[in-house]
Image: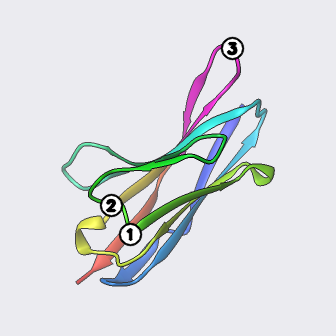
Amino acid sequence: QVQLVESGGGLVQAGGSLRLSCAASGTIGSINAMAWYRQAPGKQREWVAIITSAGNTNYAASLKGRFTISRDNAKNTVYLQMNSLKPEDTAVYYCKANMGSGTRYDYWGQGTQVTVSS
C-alpha cells in the first residue's frame, strides 16, 4: 500500500509564500515522475508542475517563475515552493507520484488547502 501525504498548506496574504511537501510511504518501488496539481472551487483540476526522477522540471506556463518544484529522492518527498502568491492561487493542491518500473501506477495524495487572501 502506498500513501502520499501533503502538508504545508494554509492561509497566506497575497504576495506571501508557502512551501508544500508531499511524502510517499508504504510499499514503494521506484518513483518516477512526481507532480503537483490544483483544483480551485468550481473548476477542474489543473496541472501545476512536474519533476522527473532525474530532476528535470516543467511548469504550467502561467505559473513559471513563481513556483518551483523539487524533490528529495532519499526522503521520497516532493516539494512545491510558491512565491508571490495571488488570490487566484487559492485551491486544494494535490501531489501525484508515478511508480513502478514495468507496469506503472499513479498515486494521489489527499490534498492540502491553500488560501490566499487579498
Q: Is residue 63 above or below residue 83?
A: above
Disc number placed over residue 102 in the picture, else none: 3
Q: Secondary structure at mark 1?
A: loop
- Residue placed under numbered mark 2 in the picture: 63
Query: Which amino acid is tagged 1?
Result: Arg
| Residue name at image x 42 percent, y 55 percent | 93
**Residue 101 counted in the magenta span:** yes
| Residue name at image x 31 percent, y 44 percent | 45
- What whole-number distance in Å separates the C-alpha atoms at marks 2 and 3? 32 Å
Q: Earlier in the sequence, mark 2 or mark 3?
A: 2
Residue 77 position within the rendered picture, expressed as x and y whole percent measured from the top left: 68, 53
Specify few, some or many for label 2: CA neighbours under 10 Å numbering under 14, 14-19, or 20 or more: some
In the image, which residues are magenta? 95-109
Specify few, some or many for label 1: CA neighbours under 10 Å numbering under 14, 14-19, or 20 or more: few
Is 111 left or right of 99, judged from the image as shown?
left
- Residue placed under numbered mark 1 in the picture: 66
| Magenta stretch: helix, strand or loop mostly | strand
Residue 12 found in image quarter: bottom left
Is 37 left or right of 24, judged from the image as shown?
left
Q: Secondary structure at mark 2?
A: loop
| Residue name at image x 72 percent, y 31 percent | 1
